[in-house]
Amino acid sequence: MSEVPDRGAERGVNRPPGDSGLYLDGVTVRFDGFRALNALSLLVEPGELRAVIGPNGAGKTTMMDVITGKTRPAEGVVRFAGRDLTRMDESAIANLGIGRKFQKPTVFDALSVFENLELALKAPRGPIACLRWVLAGAARDAILATAQRIGLEARVHDKAGLLSHGQRQWLEIGMLLMQDPQLLLVDEPVAGMTDHETAQTAELLAGIAGGARSVVVVEHDLDFVRALGCRVTVLHEGTMLSEGSIDHVQADPRVVDVYLGR
Amino acid sequence: MRRSIIAIIAVLALVPLLNLLPAGHPLHASDFVVSIVGKWICYAILALALDLAWGYAGILSLGHGAFFALGGYAIGMHLMRLIGPRGVYGHPVLPDFMVFLGYQELPWFWWGFSSFPFALAMALLVPALLAFVVGWLAFRSRITGVYLSIITQAMTYALMLAFFRNDMGFGGNNGFTDFKELLGMPLNQGSTRALLYVAALAVLTGAFWMSAAMTRTKFGRVLTAIRDGESRVRFLGYDTLRHKLFVFVLSAMMAGLAGALYVPIVGIINPGEFSPANSIEAVVWVAFGGRGTLVGAVLGAFSVNALKTWLTSVAPDLWLIALGLLFIAVPLLLPRGLVGLMRR
């Protein structure tokens, strides 16, 4: 489990862009006059694990939509690895190394765990390339290593349709890992999971972040966020309300007011 | 699965041999049986083609009969050219219907059809081109599900209306018939019919083998994934348009080849083959046998057609009702078809 990063205080979000990592500054998204995001700023370092919490409608999903190119901001800067994401479409952003796990797990039930991971593995994607695809030793090893990482090594040959809800979530995370992303956006990974599965998921995500790979987790479950042991960003009405360790934000009177107190 | 298809092919291979037994023998298969089972083999190839598109990739085409009919028309044009001066009007070049309609010369789109390889190539390429254009337009606009089914249904209906017109140059209402020979062999001879039967069976075997090999590759798994969650596949970085187009065109070519084998066996092709009901029947075969399994498609084609042949001889009025009942009952009672029933 990673330590709580303690560098946050001196690290402002106003650092100039062009660096690696994810950088949002002054991002505003309006839907019919309603500000889903209101001058949101956020900085995620390479290799960092970050939790984003906030009440419903705080703008968490809109933030993910902006990063993945699904929604265009009216104002603001969105950069990743020195590239301006507001000028790229969804697939280009995906190919830049930003993977997104949606709330609802969508794995392919008719295929085995192994085959699901194999589909996600970085490889030529055209029909002819797929027809000629031969599973080489290195690819097999990479798939099995990922299966082990997501705790499904004993079930690689089972159909994904036979997995439990929690295992399906892990498989989906494993499929994202096969795409070798530099930034993983994970939307409510533990919704509907048992306590045991939740703890395992926290461990999994904490283990995935590191090196050059950052992970941003959007979550409601505060016990889970605590188990992640990482920096926490609290969103409220489309803007950042508080940032710091889980103890720090839970003690912040503004956070207590708008979110935890209710 | 492998054993069941080998058993089916072995039984089918027996039919022309049983035809050689003396007529009084209890196991003798009549010429009628040879020709009707040969017809079913062609239907089984069509069912395989449809199953690749529908059972695997989730593209529910209600117009596969059009590809089948186009393949049949291509070979039909070759057979018409081979009649030569033996037609009723005795014209050295023009088929009878053209003489009757007052054509002075062969239309340009009939050029080349005196060559068998050319006609066979057209039986594959014309369905492929049509599938490519329709598929590209539909898949590019992300038309799926029932809307795609309606478009393919409209496609075959439009072609039926077009081919019914006399001035299309394809024999109108009557289509083509009275064929004399193919590759130098008279079509009314038992040996030619046996050869056509064997050719159809060989193509069915080859098509089955090719489909089975293809569905075992990663491409096959991508198709299954597209069927179950196309947007997720796109999100994994696959351009699903290319995969769907590939399988749709391949499927249309298989259907065209089935039609090309069918026409010399039954000795006639007319615009009725484009009828939307034919395409729907093909969907019923695949659903009844078990979609998404290749053996199911083949089994379904044989069993539903056997039922049709039997019912239309004992109670002709009941067939359409039976077809409708199958269409309703299969998804409700046999969602995985005969193959699902056998596995249970």
Image: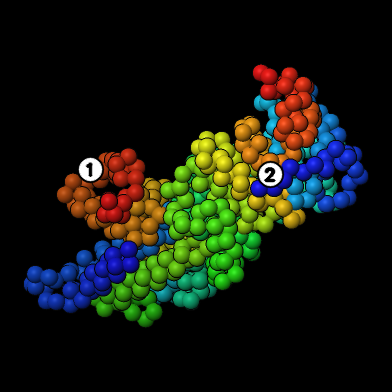
Which chain's residue wears label 1?
B
Amino acid under label 1?
Leu
Q: Position of residue B239 (x, y in %)?
A: 63, 55
Secondary structure under the numbered disc 1 in the rendered image: helix
Which residue is depicted at the point 42% across and 66% down?
B212
User: Which colour scheme appears in the figure?
Assistant: rainbow
- In this rendering, do the residues under marks 2 and 1 share a single chain? no
A5 or B32: nearer the eye? A5
Q: Which residue is mark 2?
A: A185
Secondary structure under the numbered disc 2 in the rendered image: strand
What label does residue A155 carry, if any? Answer: none
Q: Which residue is mark 1?
A: B318
Q: Is residue A42 above or below residue B198?
A: above
Which residue is depicted at the point 33% across and 79% down?
B185
Toward which corner of the image does residue A67 lie, by quadrant?
A: top right
Which residue is depicted at the point 75% across and 47% down?
A48
Amino acid under label 2?
Leu
Residue B7 can be seen in this image: yes
Q: Position of residue B304 (x, y in %)?
A: 28, 53
Residue A135 as seen in the image, left or right of residue A164: right
Q: How many labels sit on residues? A: 2
Q: Residues within 10 Å of mark 1 (few under 14, many from 20)?
A: few
B195 or B109: nearer the eye? B195
Toward which corner of the image does residue A129 lie, by quadrant?
A: bottom right
Q: CA distance from mark 2 to mark 1?
A: 59 Å
Q: Is residue B294 above or below residue B121?
A: above
Which chain's residue wears label 2?
A
Residue B207 can be seen in this image: no
Which residue is depicted at the point 36% across and 68% down?
B204
Q: Position of residue A108 (x, y in %)?
A: 50, 50
Q: Residues within 10 Å of mark 2 (few under 14, many from 20)?
A: many
B200 or B336: nearer the eye? B336
